[in-house]
Amino acid sequence: MMSGLKVYAVSMVIAVATLAVTFGGAFEPVFAEQSKATRGALRCAIASGRSFIFGSTRNLDCVYEPARNGKSERYSGRIRKFGIDLGFVKKGVIIWRVIAPVAPAGPGALSGKYAGVSAQVAVGAGVGANALVSGNKIMLNPISLSGASGLNLAIGVAGLELTYSGRR
């Protein structure tokens, strides 16, 4: 017999799949346009924290590594999730592939606001997906999540805001 938590987690996975099918096409033109050019990687340390019923906020400390001949850049930021978000998560690291039609121009080019659909389940080790798109045609596509552990379930809309903190 499955415990209440497992039944709830399975129900949420079904809900995430439904959200992906329903809203996945909303970003399709942007993804198609940007799928041609990986411009680097953004590695972010995520602070630990508790989640509330309707959402959570986590602080980030990030480093952008350009794919070609460029100096690393530091960013601070916040990721917010709106929707169902229950539990707690220990600190972790997420790495996003930075995708854009052209290379981000100049220091601080990744600064700004990003949005997308988010889903994460953590029972012990965490699994999540947070593809985010900015108004300046930069997409952050998650390629690795490590160290996030705890007991958490999050489904909804994610927002990320990055602020340039200087060269590394």
Image (cartoon, rainbow, N blue to C red):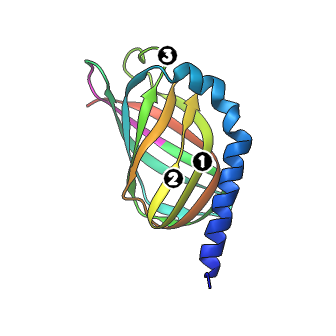
Q: What residue is shown with label 1?
A: 118
Q: Which mark is residue 151?
A: none
Residue at (48%, 62%) from the top-left corner? 49
Query: Looking at the magenta stretch, what is its main secondary structure?
Result: strand
In the image, what residue occupies the spot 69% across and 33% down? Answer: 25
Q: Earlier in the sequence, mark 3 or mark 2?
A: 3
The numbered mark, 2 or 1, whose residue comes first in the sequence reads 1
The span shown in magenta is 70-77
Q: Is residue 125 left or right of residue 55?
A: left
Q: Is residue 41 magenta?
A: no
Give, as a three-letter code, the residue at label 1: Ser
Q: Secondary structure at mark 2?
A: strand
Question: How many residues crowd around disc 3 within 10 Å: few (fewer than 14), some, or many (20 or more)?
Answer: some
Is 53 on the left or on the right of 38, as rendered? Answer: right
Mark 3 vs mark 1: which is more N-terminal?
3
Q: Percent position (x, y) of residue 20?
A: 66, 45
Residue toward you, 19 or 90: 19
Q: Identify the residue at the far bottom of this view.
A: 1
For the C terminus, give its image quadrant: top left
Q: Secondary structure at mark 3?
A: loop
Residue ID for mark 2: 128
Q: Is residue 99 above or below residue 148?
A: above
Label 3 sits on what residue type?
Answer: Pro
Q: Which residue is the site of mark 3?
A: 101
Residue 45 vertical placement versus 27 (above, below):
below
Residue extending farthest to the right is 22
| Mark 2 vs 1: CB contact within 8 A | yes
- Tag 2: residue type? Gly
